[in-house]
Amino acid sequence: PVGFYQLAAPKTLNRASEDSNQYTTDSKVDKTNIADFTPEEISRLKQGITRWDFDLFATSRLTDGHAMQAVAHEIVTRHMLLHELDINEYQFMRFIIQVERHYRRNPYHNASHAADVLQSAYCIIFRTGFMDFMTPLELFTILVTAAVHDIEHTGTNNNFHKNTGSEMAKLYMVSILENHHVRVGLRMVQEHELLKNVSRNDFAEFKFMLVAMILSTDMSNHFLLLTNMRLIIGTTVKKPNDRLRIQRIMMLVLHAADISNSAKSWDQHKVWITLLCEEFFRQGDKEKELQLPISPSCDRNVANIATLQIGFMQTFTKETFDVMDKLLERTITQYGRPYVPFNPWQDCMQENLCKWSGKWKSLKYEQINELLCETEGPRMSIAISVSRSKVRLPRMSVPTSRPCGRFCTCCGILKSSKNNDEEETSVNVEYSAN
């Protein structure tokens, strides 16, 4: 057996010892974080797994930074996928734990981002009713693919690898990072023998779908992907069990989930953006040190964060979700099922556009203090404290006029009660080093 984090009450929450396969209740989450949640709050998190406003940051705080374990286990358990595919529960969770450990501690492209994409993709297919047309193998594949889609991401983009002649760039001509994610993801699936009990044809189908979906997350393929999806919208379903059509839609769903931070509520969106910008700026710093051209949006001295976000939402995110909405409606109705519109992302994008066009429209790196202060608590919950990183983000202090207890209600910063000279002492929740 192997212990893992779950969306569960304290009595059933456990974790394996780092040095053995035996269960132990000596879990960091039991002693530190579980006291911050009532049983009702944990139950709401568990039930909220199907919601677009699912609180990943609270889940990460509850699980001590291991949200992927809790989210993956909750979804496969709800739909009895492991039973359907004859997969041992502990075998699957060993796989998820190792996937989580293979994510690097980048500000944005980390295991928490993968957990967010996993839950977002699940929410889309579940709430729109598209999941009713998927086989258990297809559902399992999109969940596994979401979990591994950015595995071993370096925190730099494909252009950086090309310009620096990295080892990855020597292996792959195009979609450098995405091809690496495919290779590592498939290797780990095979090492853990996840699908050893399915037929050879089913495993070949699994590999085909995983490769296609991960490659669809390459932003250089964005416009080609949307063009193909628009063509599908204009076609009629020729047979009631068109698997290829279903699997193409899965590619779009994963791509949408991957860029969905712009389509989440402002409270979530602004957290992800502070992390994403920090990762971009770190790449820009590296490019400057190597005397390479600084990639667009990676220069912390000139980048206007609001302009970048408005442009990305209008050019990429909104178009992607618009096409996905039309494609899902067209497919579901053609299959003879009533379509119940579910598109909360449209309101979220409109709210975010208003925010970036209003208060934050002139936001640049040197003005980011206030946004960092607003997002400090959630960012720490996924083990990334940007304000205290080794790269040059401005350090924040909290005036003594604000509440000085353990949790500051004004700015959401977890603070030590021994706070001297107005200097903040943050409580970090970090991933296990193992």
Image (cartoon, rainbow, N blue to C red):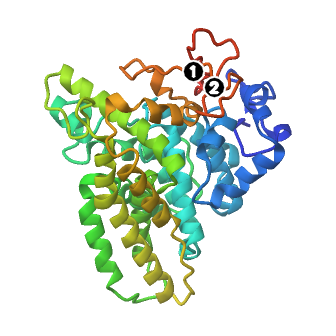
Q: In this picture, is 136 found above or below 31?
A: below
Residue topped by disc 1: 399
Depth check, front residue: 216 or 244: 216
Residue topped by disc 2: 402
Amino acid type, mark 1: Pro
Q: Is there any visible trace of residue 388 in the rendered image?
A: yes
Amino acid type, mark 2: Arg
Instruction: Name the residue rendered at 24%, 65% in the picture.
Output: 224
- Horizontal side of 405 relative to 35 (left or right) equals left
Q: In this picture, is 402 found above or below 53?
A: above
On-image quarter of the N terminus: top right
Whether tag 1 and tag 2 are in contact, CB under 8 A, the answer is: yes
Q: Is there any visible trace of residue 155 in the rendered image?
A: no
Depth check, front residue: 59 or 401: 401
Instruction: Please state the horizontal and vertical placement of residue 260, each as a whole percent of the image.
Output: 44, 55
Q: Residue furthest top?
A: 421
Instruction: Please state the horizontal and vertical placement of residue 332, each as a whole percent of the image.
Output: 50, 82
